[in-house]
């Protein structure tokens, strides 16, 4: 702890010693030629296999190396055609037909709709071990396949009860669904042994799913038909997420034929991709070099020949290298401590923009006294979020007690009043707590980090000041902390949730009863039903109205206490142009170019750095 | 002598076994899973992942499996980097750690011995006091202070060396100095003290009386006495250099294996943690053995029994 303190003091010293003079932080001329750029990842990507990646840097790399059905607009992130030239959406919003352009993999093999069919089944196949498989649970039968559901064929007119009668003597059923279109029934059995027993005892009748039941089919080389379980108005955003990027089936199958594990396909020496850049060189935990892919379908619009990515974790080192001109940006994954912003903010190459992510405290709905709604509301109203973001987090975060950020997918935020100590005290009295019967000590837990500690201490002080209650704060190492949340061994616990697509649903679905990420123990039939109904609404305005109704329930019940919307802060050299900041902090190298004479151009066409409004429409 | 070494080497095996078994069990005691993250994993995917790494087996079976792999030099698979084996990760990172330690040690020896000689020969002069004050500072200033200071001076004020990263001797200078300075200071004090013991010895006076040049006296007669404590210090120092490079590697983004000490444990990357533990245990045990042997060679009073 002390070493960290001394370190940050020293870094502050370093920061204040900077003599820019011209208002920029360090070097303002590139140390490299005009056909390349130097950026940074804060860590080695865990994997570059799109089906398996589950973190920011791997995702950024994948989105620059692979090209999916759609791609995000660099500023608004709205889905634009990519490998899919155009698409048709059925009346009921449950069938998407994508028409693919002619394109090839980087080894010259044509890319077809079958590659997407193969990839998406691979993501859903539990054997692949995809941690983000749930991204494609919206596909018809997708979740069933991932849950290793058993399939009963030729059901005919048999009722659910009859089928249960057949299975239940052998195994406990978690879920049974009938699919009249396929003339089949699907049964989820959680216990693997019981599942094996059913397969053994009922041969011929019951089978394992093989993936062909999943709603993704290649009609021909250039047509991909996707069927959804329920309409998902934001589905096109899913198709541009890194988990949905295609993998080269021919390469995986070749490795298998050669007797190697096919999962090795994405190692640097094997990898084949189809996006703007190819992985030319990778030195583990040192750097990566991307070269322009001449076979990318839109290669003529890719400007830079080469991108060099350092892999530097320490933010001090990253800042030093940026200052010395060894980096053109600090990269999408470097997080700076709050103390730095006061100094950095004064530089012209510093940018800060809202990020689609909400900082909040989980509330355990089974742990007294916070199981009482009034207590939760009182705790929430006693947090002065305005002061918190101004004095503690200091990077321009947006104070908010809502779970859906304003403007997301055209959504108008509830704008719940977030600080009212008078009312907070009244609520606490109403809950039966006062000077003669004080609220028992509540414990606020957070994962070990200087930043989270500062926030927790501030909140603790606000509760003491405005409610007169004592709260304990307690830190736990990340994995231990996750375990505590999972086993619901906590009262209040810090968390952050990054939205996956610009739609209120990405935040609201977190609190549905069956969502595995819902750590609060709270659920409501009414809430779940509103969310379900919302997606069946044809009219976007009516849909948003339903979602708003759901958020009102959230705001009353408070399964979490939201504090603020995150921001991402970046340093970008003035000569690096074509980079735009978007609310997912997606770096798109194909738009980048180097302008050595940047100072001669008009400042306003230098970098379109303003934060774009959230897109007005939810999906296609 | 040879018998002693062989006996000691055989003695290392049970020690190593105890270390491996204990750390294997301790690592598993920590709550949390290698696969947990903000976003929950679908249940069947978790089952498959656990099966892939053998985490679904009873703990004693996993331990036996691990020991079996260890016999063949197989350290298992990393869970954090699923396409890489622990052997590969160590093979990729260890050379960087070794190079860094090598540069640091060379720096420590060159600067330390030179300063020690000057201090001893010019005892109680301004030189001596100045150098020994510097040595005191070198011992007291921790690397996480020295490192950023060097960066401030040599990378940001005057761009002489890069502030971090990897790719040649240029990148090794600042981390090497940062890591080696403590040892340079220590060696300087050891050398000075060792030489002062012999500086007034009769054979030195004899050499002077013979009219030998002062430099030759220092080189041939005084250093031998002065360096004995330094040599014995080198064994544990080299081992410490390897272990303590953790901090320096973090500051300068050196792609060595130092950071895994902490990161692998935080990530619950069980096999990587074990791999690092095994590697360092073997290194430390062998270093200690070498020191024991050297003691005997330098000091005839010690016998190998």
Image (cartoon, coloured by chain):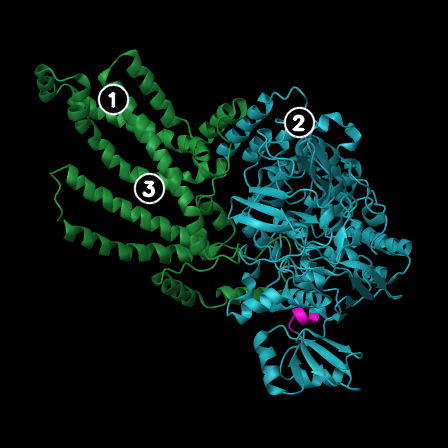
Chain colours: A cyan, B green
- Choose mark 2 or mark 3, whichever is in front: 3
Q: Nearer the viewer, residue A594 or A357?
A: A594
Q: CA distance from mark 3 to mark 1?
A: 25 Å
Circle 3: is it few (<14), some (14-19), or many (20+) Cα within 10 Å? some
Residue A478: say if magenta: no
Circle 2: is it few (<14), some (14-19), or many (20+) Cα within 10 Å? few
Label annotation for residue B239:
3
Q: Quadrant of residue A133?
A: bottom right
Label annotation for residue A342:
2
Q: Are marks 2 and 1 on the same chain?
A: no
Q: Are marks 3 and 1 on the same chain?
A: yes
Specify whether A217 is left or right of A544: left
Label annotation for residue B117:
1
Residue A145: say if magenta: yes
What percent of the width, then of the height, locates residue A543? 87, 56
Asked which secondary structure carries label 3, the reply is helix
Q: Quadrant of the C terminus of chain A?
A: bottom right
Q: CA distance from mark 2 to mark 3?
A: 42 Å
Q: Nearer the viewer, residue B126 or A517?
A: B126
Q: Which residues are magenta?
A: A144-148
Asked which secondary structure carries label 1, the reply is helix
Q: Nearer the viewer, residue A106 or A606?
A: A106
A474 vs B85: above or below: above
């Amino acid at each position: 702890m002390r070493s960290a303190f001394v370190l940050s003091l020293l870094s502050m010293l370093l920061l204040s010693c900077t003599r820019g003079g011209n208002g920029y932080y360090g070097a303002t001329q590139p140390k490299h030629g005009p056909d390349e750029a130097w950026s940074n990842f804060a860590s080695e990507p865990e994997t570059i296999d799109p089906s398996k990646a589950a973190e920011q840097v791997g995702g950024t790399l994948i989105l620059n190396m692979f090209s999916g059905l759609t791609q995000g607009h660099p500023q608004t992130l709205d889905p634009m055609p990519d490998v899919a030239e155009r698409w048709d959406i059925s009346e009921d919003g449950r069938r998407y037909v994508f028409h693919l352009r002619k394109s090839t993999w980087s080894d010259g093999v044509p890319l077809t709709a079958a590659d997407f069919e193969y990839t998406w089944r691979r993501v859903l196949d539990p054997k692949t071990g995809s941690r983000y498989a749930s991204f494609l649970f919206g596909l018809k039968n997708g979740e069933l396949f991932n849950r290793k559901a058993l399939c009963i064929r030729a059901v005919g007119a048999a009722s659910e009860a009859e089928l249960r009668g057949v299975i239940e003597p052998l195994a406990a059923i978690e879920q049974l669904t009938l699919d009249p279109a396929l003339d089949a029934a699907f049964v989820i059995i959680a216990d693997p042994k019981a599942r094996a027993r059913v397969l053994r005892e009922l041969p011929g009748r019951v089978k394992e799913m093989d993936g062909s039941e999943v709603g993704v089919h290649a009609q021909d080389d250039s047509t991909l038909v996707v069927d959804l379980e329920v309409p998902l108005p934001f589905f096109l955003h899913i198709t541009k997420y890194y988990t949905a990027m295609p993998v080269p089936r021919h390469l995986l199958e070749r490795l298998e034929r050669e007797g190697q594990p096919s999962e090795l396909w994405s190692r640097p020496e094997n990898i084949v991709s189809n996006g703007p850049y190819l992985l030319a060189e990778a030195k583990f935990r040192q750097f990566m070099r991307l070269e322009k892919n001449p076979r990318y379908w839109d290669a003529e619009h890719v400007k830079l020949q080469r991108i060099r990515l350092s892999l530097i974790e320490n933010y001090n080192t990253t800042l030093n290298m940026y200052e010395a001109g060894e980096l053109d940006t600090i990269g999408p994954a470097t997080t700076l401590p709050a103390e730095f912003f006061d100094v950095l903010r004064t530089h012209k190459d510093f940018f800060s923009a809202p990020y689609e992510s909400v900082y909040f405290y989980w509330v355990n709905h089974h742990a007294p006294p916070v199981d009482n709604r009034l207590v939760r509301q009182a705790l929430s109203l006693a947090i002065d979020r305005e002061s918190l973001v101004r004095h503690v987090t200091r990077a321009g975060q947006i104070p908010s007690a809502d779970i859906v950020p304003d403007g997301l997918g055209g959504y108008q935020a509830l704008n719940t009043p977030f600080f009212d100590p008078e009312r907070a005290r009244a609520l606490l009295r109403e809950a039966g707590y006062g000077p003669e019967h004080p609220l028992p000590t509540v414990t606020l837990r957070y994962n070990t980090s200087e930043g989270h500690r500062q926030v927790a201490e501030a909140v603790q002080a606000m509760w003491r000041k405005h409610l007169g209650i004592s709260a304990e704060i307690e830190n736990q190492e990340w994995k231990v902390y996750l375990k505590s949340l999972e086993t619901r061994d906590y009262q209040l616990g810090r968390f952050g949730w990054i939205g996956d697509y610009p739609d209120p649903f990405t935040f609201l679905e977190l609190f549905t009863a069956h969502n595995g990420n819902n750590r609060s123990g709270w659920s409501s039939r009414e809430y779940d039903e509103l969310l379900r109904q919302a997606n069946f609404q044809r009219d976007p305005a009516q849909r948003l109205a339903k979602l708003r109704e759901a958020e009102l329930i959230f705001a009353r019940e408070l399964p979490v206490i939201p504090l603020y919307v995150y921001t991402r802060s970046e340093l970008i050299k003035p000569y690096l142009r074509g980079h735009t900041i978007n609310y997912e902090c997606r770096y798109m190298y194909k738009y980048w170019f180097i302008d050595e004479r940047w100072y001669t151009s008009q400042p306003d066409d230098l970098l379109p750095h303003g934060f774009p409004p959230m897109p007005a429409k939810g999906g296609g | 002598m040879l018998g002693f070494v062989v006996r000691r080497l055989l003695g290392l095996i049970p020690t190593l076994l105890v270390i491996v078994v204990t750390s294997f069990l301790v690592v598993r005691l920590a709550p949390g899973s290698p696969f947990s993250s903000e976003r929950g994993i679908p249940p069947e995917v978790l089952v498959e992942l656990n099966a892939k790494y053998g985490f679904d087996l009873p703990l004693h079976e996993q331990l036996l499996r691990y020991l079996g792999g260890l016999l063949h030099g197989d350290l298992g698979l990393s869970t954090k980097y699923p396409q890489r084996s622990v052997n590969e990760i160590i093979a990729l990172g260890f050379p960087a750690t070794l190079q860094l330690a090598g540069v640091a040690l060379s720096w420590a020896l060159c600067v330390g011995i030179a300063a020690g000689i000057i201090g001893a020969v010019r005892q109680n002069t301004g030189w001596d006091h100045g150098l020994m004050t510097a040595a005191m500072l070198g011992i007291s200033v921790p690397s996480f202070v020295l490192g950023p200071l060097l960066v401030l001076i040599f990378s940001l004020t005057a761009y002489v060396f890069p502030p971090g990263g990897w790719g040649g001797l240029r990148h090794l200078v600042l981390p090497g100095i940062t890591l080696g300075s403590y040892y340079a200071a220590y060696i300087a004090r050891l050398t000075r003290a060792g030489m002062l013991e012999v500086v007034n010895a009769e054979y030195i006076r004899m050499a002077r009386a013979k009219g030998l040049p002062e430099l030759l006296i220092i080189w041939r007669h005084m250093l031998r006495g002065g360096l004995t404590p330094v040599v014995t210090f080198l064994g544990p120092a080299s081992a410490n250099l390897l272990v303590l490079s953790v901090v320096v590697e973090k500051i300068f983004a050196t792609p060595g294996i130092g950071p895994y000490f902490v990161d692998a444990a935080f990530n619950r990357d069980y096999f990587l943690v074990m791999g690092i533990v095994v590697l360092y245990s073997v290194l430390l045990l062998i270093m200690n053995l070498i020191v024991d042997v050297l003691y005997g060679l330098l000091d005839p009073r010690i016998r190998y029994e």
